[in-house]
Amino acid sequence: MVKRRRVPSVRDGGQVGCWLAALVTSGVLLAMVIAAAPARAGVWSVAPLSSLDQDQSNGSGNLTADSCVAGGYCMALGVDDTRGLDHQVTLEEVYNGGTWTRVTGPAGFAHTYPAALSCSSMTYCMAVGLANAALWNGTSWRAVPSGGVISFTAVSCAMTTCMAVGTRGRLDIPVAELWRNGVLRKIVAPLKAVSPDSVYCGSSSRCLVVGDFACPAQGRCPKSQPFAESWNGHSWAVMKGAGRSRHEVDHISCVSLTWCMGVGSNYSDIWNGRTWTYLGPAGHALPPIVSCVTAVACEAVGSTTRPSNRNHLMALASEWNGHGWTNELVPDNGATSSQLVAVSCASTVLCTAVGNVGTEVLNPLAESWQPS
């Protein structure tokens, strides 16, 4: 059965290298549909983080979550294990004014990588992980309650209302939780077969969730399954056009409740406020992460095997211009292996993406996209 992907916990230790190797041996490639129409002109470049100890014997961590807001402010979260696995701390970097600055991250995430981050402003962000949730007020973090041991996969904040989705227990039972001003509000879980992978909240009472479902490891599902649901403040409903699909949507980015881009392992779908439309196959791809600012400006990131060495990964990005996808070059300063696992666009002139460089030993990586 297809299992929900997750960022490996530092507690996995040496399994991190195995996790990367599994991606390589599966022959995963980030190839997107390339349309004839010209793409927006832009360039990715390495955005140096604050001064970190790049000790290759222990590594210095991995960035796993990224969120930007208007004005060019971005926050990235991960784990710093410069002093070894027994002395891990949460890594937090803030991008403001064109540079990254290291600040103190939320407690409780050091042994379980932050899975997702959402900022509605410079003074309101929520981070979630394995059985952890925390709020940022512009100055410091504080833990907020959750309804038990939940493996959160995504979070989205609209003003001071945030929804996080994930699964609970060995059976991966779908779960959704809602906080208003940091106060937990009990809501029902998503319906049907969706294992929630990504969420978008356009208001305090309207959210969309996409995800995958139980399918054979090879080939398409034997029957159609829903991949997207909407929440109206009281209940969930399968979204029109999402109940007839035999593929999965793994990540969503929305401009509003009436326009969203959904991406998966070899395809993309668009929500126009009335129905989901399948854009067709986009190659054999590691499920990319996508961020859209407008309906004609999206960036998706992921990784592929290096042409020169299929045992190593190479970070890639693709750009949506309203007509199709175009692959972009992502420099990594000559790293042996690199990958991007999160992306967020603050505007049509700035996106940031984060991940790691290295194979079994990981070090943080941050990139920025700006017009050329």
Image: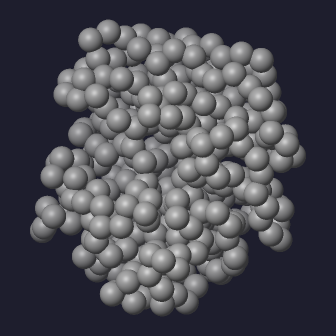
Left-right relation of 186 to 20: right
Q: Is residue 288 above or below residue 21?
A: above
Residue drawn at point x = 23 percent, y = 29 percent: 217
Q: Position of residue 288 (x, y in %)?
A: 40, 46
Q: Position of residue 262 (x, y in %)?
A: 48, 33
Task: Report how many numbered discs are placed on residues in the image.
Answer: 0
Image quadrant where residue 176 sits: top right
Nearer to the camera, 346 or 53: 53
Image quadrant where residue 71 sits: bottom right
Left-right relation of 136 to 23: right
- Quarter occupied by the N terminus: top left
Nearer to the camera, 103 or 354: 103
Q: Position of residue 27 (x, y in %)?
A: 17, 48
Residue 125 in view: no
Residue drawn at point x = 47 percent, y = 11 percent: 243
Which color scheme did the rendering employ for the protein? one colour
Residue 184 in view: yes
Residue drawn at point x = 63 percent, y = 24 percent: 189
Left-right relation of 151 to 213: right
Left-right relation of 282 to 294: left
Q: Position of residue 179 (x, y in %)?
A: 79, 40
Q: Is residue 96 above or below residue 351?
A: below
Nearer to the camera, 196 or 146: 146
